[in-house]
Image (cartoon, rainbow, N blue to C red):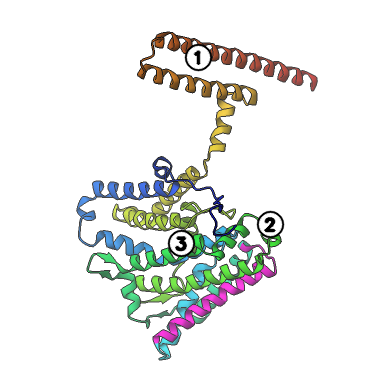
Amino acid sequence: MPGSNYDRDLSVKEGFVLKKFLVKWEMILVYIMVLINVLLAVIKPDLYFTHGTVQSMINAGLDVSPLVLGMVFILLLGDIDVSVAAQMILGGMVTGLLMDKGLPSLICVIVGIIVCMLCGAFNGFCVAFLEMPAVITTISTSMLFRGIVEIVLGENALKNFPKWYNKIGWMNIGGIIPLSMVLFLIMGAIFIFVLHKSPFGRKVYIVGNNPTCANYSGISVKKVKMQVFILMGFMAGIGSIFFIGRMGGGLSSSMGTGYEMTAIACAVLGGVSTNGGKGKMWGPIIATFIMAFLTYALGLMGIDPNTKKIVIGVILIVTILISTINKQMIKDIKLRLFYHNNKNIEAINDRTAAAVKDMKKQIKELEKGNASDKAAQIEKLNKKIEAAQKECKEKSAQWWAEQQENAKKAKERFK
């Protein structure tokens, strides 16, 4: 009965476990970020500890941050959007052209963002309603949007943008805290809430995990996809503000190349699966800072741009490879290396290991106690441990011999 003492909460609630928390992927990313800063401080202490260096590192890398936040939602659907950089430049161009016409800056910015949202809506319509592959669609629209910018601007550059763009790109609050970081963290907090606490976020996860199941559950898969691509367009519009601000208030048709790859890399490095349905928002937020520190640090160390790309690529491959290693993969490797790919050998070894662990625990408890027959009980348990290990070894050897014999017979049979 509602409100009575017989109400029961059937949800499974796991308390905070420090050991699990410290080995979560997000925490590993924190360790990587700290390691990058420590290495830079050791290698280039004169540069690192100069006032403004850390702030510049953050400011220089956060122009891609709005794209990362939007890309998380796209990847969680199991889709991809490689047109986001082109959308960002197109929206920025529209804002700049309207500013040149003398329109109010706020209207110019809003129209630029709306243009990006329309680009996202077009992508969403093609992917959700026309069922075109997201990667092919967005490659095509990327070329379309870039082509429009190149035709309109040519070799010219736009320089008339709102003055507050530069403040977002480079201003430090109190000379210490980068404004771009504050804005990014605020946006990140909003996106964390939307993804992890709102019905829309749950729908995104369900659609990403199993679109068919989501459809039968009453979720409009097409509508969710459309909304996510429009959201990506909106974030591309916001990204144009960050990007133009960091570029010093200027924009040309050749700018922003490769930013879509950086956004995808940050999202994947943050633990978001490209297969959809898996990942959290705070991982990509941390990964964005890692990319900012790493890129700027390599520049301070005098590494040329081409080598920098190679180094960043290798680091991304290694870290993403680490994130894909799960318990099942480790178990499969262990099965092949130690148990000759024999499930029976694995089972008896696991069972014996568990039994031995339990008996050793009993021995420790007996050693702490004051039982009169403590020595006899400990000796008895030690003999049980030896017997269990011996039986396990003999059984494993027997089953391995049988497996080899069967394999030999099968080979002869098919000669």
* Residue labelled with disc 3: 192
Q: Distance between the residues labelled 3 and 1?
A: 51 Å
Residue annotated with mark 2: 213
249 or 62: nearer the viewer: 62
Q: Residues within 10 Å of mark 3 (few under 14, many from 20)?
A: some
- Left or right: residue 398 compared with residue 258: right
Residue 94 showing in the rendered view: no
Q: Residue furthest bottom?
A: 102
Q: Give the magenta part as a residue range.
A: 105-134
**Which residue sits at x=25%, y=47%?**
43
Q: Look at the numbered discs 2 and 3 and tell me whether their residues touch, using CB distance below 8 Å.
A: no
Residue 38, x across and y down, in percent: 28, 47
* Earlier sequence position, callout 2 versus callout 1: 2
Q: Nearer the viewer, mark 2 or mark 1?
A: 1
Inspect the magenta stretch and tell me whether residue 341 lies in it.
no
Quarter in which the C terminus is drawn: top right
Amino acid type assigned to the residue bearing label 3 in the image: Ile
Q: As displayed, is residue 112 above or below residue 14? A: below
Q: In which quarter of the image is residue 49?
A: bottom left
Q: Which amino acid does label 2 sit on?
A: Cys
Tell me the quarter of the picture where residue 214 sits.
bottom right
CA neighbours of label 1 inside 10 A, class few (<14), some (14 to 19), many (20+): many
In this view, the mark in front (3 or 1):
1
How far across and down, in percent of the image, does residue 93 sit? 46, 79
Q: Residue visible at 48% across and 23% down? A: 357
Residue under pointer 1? 385
Q: Quadrant of the N terminus?
A: bottom right
Q: Where is residue 261 in the image (x, y as percent from the top left)?
A: 49, 60
